[in-house]
Amino acid sequence: MPKNKYSKAELNKFQKSIEKKLKSVADDFDDIKDRLDNPNKGNASLAQDSVYSVHMADAGTDSYEREKGFHFMNRESEYYKLLMYALDRIKDGTFGICKICSELIPQERMMEVPNATKCVACKEKEKLNLA
């Protein structure tokens, strides 16, 4: 009979991995926020109070870079929430169990994608609209 739950030791390993990823995401988030708050850091030629007027193309590039930064911040924030949800699933005992077929999702997948809630087969069926 296949097992349908991870052991306490396995869950602890997942939890440590997730906590490490959370710290990494938080650090990335801080770096992005810092770049958005200080867009001219290390680039004196683009300082807003520069003697020279800002060229339209430079202003467009700056705008694009800010927009890209906000996109990355949003993505990191969303990933952080999914990782927190994974920690909740560890606590309530549903971590690593496919929401569709209730089979245990392989450890390799859970280590790489700790926010996974479906096994590969069910996820593929869902993507192909077969589920």
Image (cartoon, rainbow, N blue to C red):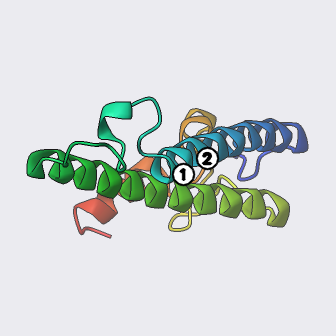
Residue indicated by mark 2? 30
- Quadrant (top left/top right/bottom left/bottom right) for the C terminus: bottom left
Residue indicated by mark 1? 33
Instruction: From the viewer's side, name the closer residue of 115 and 11.
Output: 115
As helix, strand or loop, the secondary structure at mark 2 comes to helix
Q: Position of residue 119 (x, y in %)?
A: 49, 52
Q: Is residue 120 above or below residue 41?
A: below
Quadrant of the rendered image containing residue 52: top left
Residue 69 - label: none
Amino acid under label 1?
A: Lys
Residue at x-position 48% and y-position 44%: 35
Q: Position of residue 62 (x, y in %)?
A: 26, 49
- Determine whether, in the image, residue 45 is placed left or right of residue 12: left
Instruction: From the viewer's side, name the closer residue of 125 and 78.
Output: 78
Let me know if residue 41 appears in the view: yes
Q: Is residue 118 above or below residue 105?
A: below
Q: Is residue 13 above or below residue 77?
A: above
Q: Position of residue 81 (x, y in %)?
A: 61, 63
Residue at x-position 63% and y-position 50%: 104
- Determine whether, in the image, residue 59 is placed left or right of residue 119: left
Amino acid under label 2?
A: Asp
Residue at x-position 58% and y-position 40%: 106
Q: Position of residue 21 (x, y in %)?
A: 66, 40
Neighbourhood count class around disc 2 (C-alpha, 10 Å): few under 14, some 14–19, many 20 upward: few
Residue at x-position 85% and y-position 41%: 12
Do labels 2 and 1 touch, CB within 8 Å? yes
